[in-house]
Image: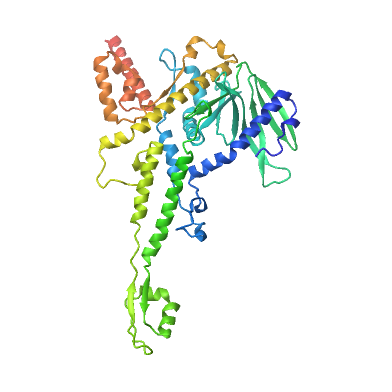
Amino acid sequence: MFGHLNPAYVPGLTDEERGMLAALIDEHRHHYSANRKKNRYYEGRVTLGEVNLGIALPYGMRGLEIGCAWGAKTVDVLAARSMFDGFVGIDGNDLPALDGIVTGNRLIPEYLKATRDELEYGCTFACLSKDPNPAVGCKIRFHSPMTAAAKWDGDKGRIAYGMAVIATAPDADELTRHSVSIVHFFTKDAVIVISRKGRNWETTRFPHKMGRPLMEPLVWNATSGKPFGRSRIKEPVRRLIQGYVRTIANATIGLEFSTAPQKYILGITDEQYDKIINDKFKQYVGNYMASTTNPETGEKPTFGQLPQGTIQPHIDMLRALSTQFSAATGLPVTDTGVVNDANPTSSDAIEAQTKTLVTMAQELNTGNGAALSTIAQMALAISRDISLDELPQEDRGIIAHFKNPALPSVAATADAALKIASARQGFSQTNTFLEMCGFDQADIRRINQQEQRARGLALADELEA
């Protein structure tokens, strides 16, 4: 992927920066194959060659493709419950200074894509830079570990330095192969743009006052040994996906044999044998089969059929795998597409099944909320060309707001809003009350505008009277 990018031949870098860039390239290459495997399982591209035990599946059927959405489900169902809804200031008000940054970078929809990458690979990186458009002020782009790498500073608890691949282009030597053409290199005092011009490289340095790299990770399930997190599609989950693919393949082959059960006929002549062998399909679909006594032996032909196979053992295996998969990922069993209960599941049972998933979503929101707050503060500082320490106090208390990951019904939230309004005076006049009643931001704006117009008309009538 990095082709001819050799830090030793990149001009404009110090010896320390060349060593840092070489370490980042090695880090990316070290994890690249593992990240590609995670992506294959997310996309459901699992071959039978990976799962074949060599017992029931013939090696000649390794080309059979079996689709499996369990990898995508593992990521998407949890990501869908992390619904970023903007930022709130220290006094609880909206932040007009951040509106241009959030809107210009499409931060809310981009966050959902970044969360999917975070859960798929274990982390994703938010990379910031100065935006020439003063209405935006700061550019925020997310990069997965497939196109970015970073080194962790354990002492400061943040990224020490990192890089992100911005663009690729065909190689001069081999046009069918693409290699990086633009790389952003993030250090504590600059963003260095490394660009390829033909066979040579050039650098452009953009200093900043942040005192830290303009790069912040969104991390899932981090540990002290793995500060950049762990993927939701980890090895035990991949083994269960392999079991699903193997079981479906066996069931598919078993169903073929069940469709055409094996029959036999004994005591026939050579001519009758040749006739049956030469047109097996016609003999199988025929309404009846006639045969005379074998003149050589006097034996009457005997017809029979071997016991027909069943796919019930495969279904039982799928149910066992779905139960293990649910336990490993926290997803309800119904999300696996395998029904275990003959009777419909009650709403209480469904809520109990999703409790683990809601807890995971809350954990995800907590970690990502802290990262988004840091990203918002750095974005404000970049847009104003100041350091983080120079931000006013009201901008340091920015918090990210998320919708309830439990996804309660509109009736339940509206009932709760009415009860709170009866106990807390003035709550019914707030936008939060309208949100709990199920109105989105577009409806809330229309309601506020129409209420304001109605109050203006009433005031005009009073003045006229």
Among the 4 quarters of the image, the one containing residue 294: bottom left
Q: Quadrant of residue 262?
A: bottom left
Q: Where is the N terminus found, in terms of image quarters?
A: top right
Residue 334 versus residue 425: which sits nearer the camera? 334
The outermost residue toward the bottom is 295
**From this viewpoint, is residue 84 visible?**
no
- Residue 251 is situated, as x and y percent measured from the top left of the image, at 39, 56
Relative side of 394 to 284, left or right: right
Instruction: Reply above or below: 52 against 234.
Output: below
> Where residue 447 sits in the image (x, y, percent)?
34, 23
Near-viewer residue (151 or 1): 151
Q: Quadrant of the C terminus?
A: top left
Where is residue 18? Give x, y as percent.
71, 27
Residue 112 lies, in percent from the top left, at 46, 32
Q: Is residue 426 positioned above or below 126 on the image? A: above
Q: Is residue 371 left or right of residue 258?
A: right
